[in-house]
Amino acid sequence: MMDSRQNKVRVIYDRRIFATYHLFVLPRVRLENQGRVVLLDMVVDMGATDIVVDPEVFDGLGIQPSRQIYAVSATSRHRGARGKIERVAVSREPVAENVSVVAMDLPEGLVGEGLLGASFLQRFPFFVDYARGLLEFWT
């Protein structure tokens, strides 16, 4: 049930990519850790357990790996490292803190620079309407 104090936020995404691939790619998602900031175009992936970024981004943000993991995709098995990032923001909001992130080589040809998975998405009620190309979060 929605709290009347929550705000509905319509998220801006790349409409050209949506029209071609039916993927929501959010521009300039802000990842912050230890005073370092990276802005990435990220694919909303409701099937991904975590946020997934390239190992260079993970290392560049100074994220400390807490453990090695194996992930299974539709086509293969991948090895990566899991850690926590201090802050993730989509535009001004929604914003989440202390979010699980995985460093893993991203698929060649991916239309974004990372995956925005459940470690972020599960923190906010959200609504997706593919027919209308609509993505909204309640914060």
Image: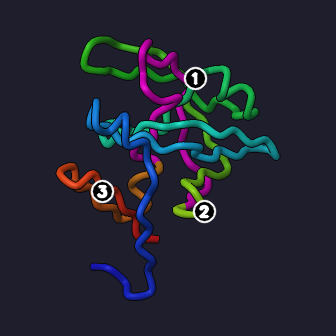
Asked if the residue at tag 1 contacts the one at tag 3, i.e. Cβ–Cβ closer than 8 Å, the answer is: no
* Residue sitting at x 47%, y 71%: 139
Residue segment shown in magenta: 95-119
Image mark count: 3
Secondary structure of residue under mark 2: loop
Q: Provide the residue designation for mark 2.
A: 92
Frontmost residue, 121 versus 114: 114
For residue 88, above or below residue 37: below
Give the amino acid at mark 3. Answer: Leu
Quadrant of the image containing the N terminus: bottom left
Secondary structure of residue under mark 3: strand
* Residue sitting at x 62%, y 21%: 55
Disc 1 residue crowd, few under 14, some 14–19, many 20+, Cα 10 Å: some
The verdict on residue 110 being magenta is: yes
Marks 3 and 2 sit apart, C-alpha to C-alpha, by: 18 Å
Q: Where residue 17 sits: x, y (%)? A: 36, 34
- Earlier sequence position, callout 3 versus callout 1: 1
Of badges 2 and 1, the one in the foreground is 2
Of badges 3 and 1, the one in the foreground is 3
**Residue 134: which disc?**
3
For residue 12, above or below residue 103: below
Secondary structure of residue under mark 1: loop
Q: Provide the residue designation for mark 1.
A: 54
- The quadrant in which residue 81 appears is top right
Marks 2 and 1 sit apart, C-alpha to C-alpha, by: 24 Å
Give the amino acid at mark 2. Answer: Arg
Q: Residue furthest right?
A: 35
* Residue sitting at x 49%, y 37%: 42
Asked if the residue at tag 2 contacts the one at tag 3, i.e. Cβ–Cβ closer than 8 Å, the answer is: no
Q: Is residue 64 shown left or right of residue 51?
A: right
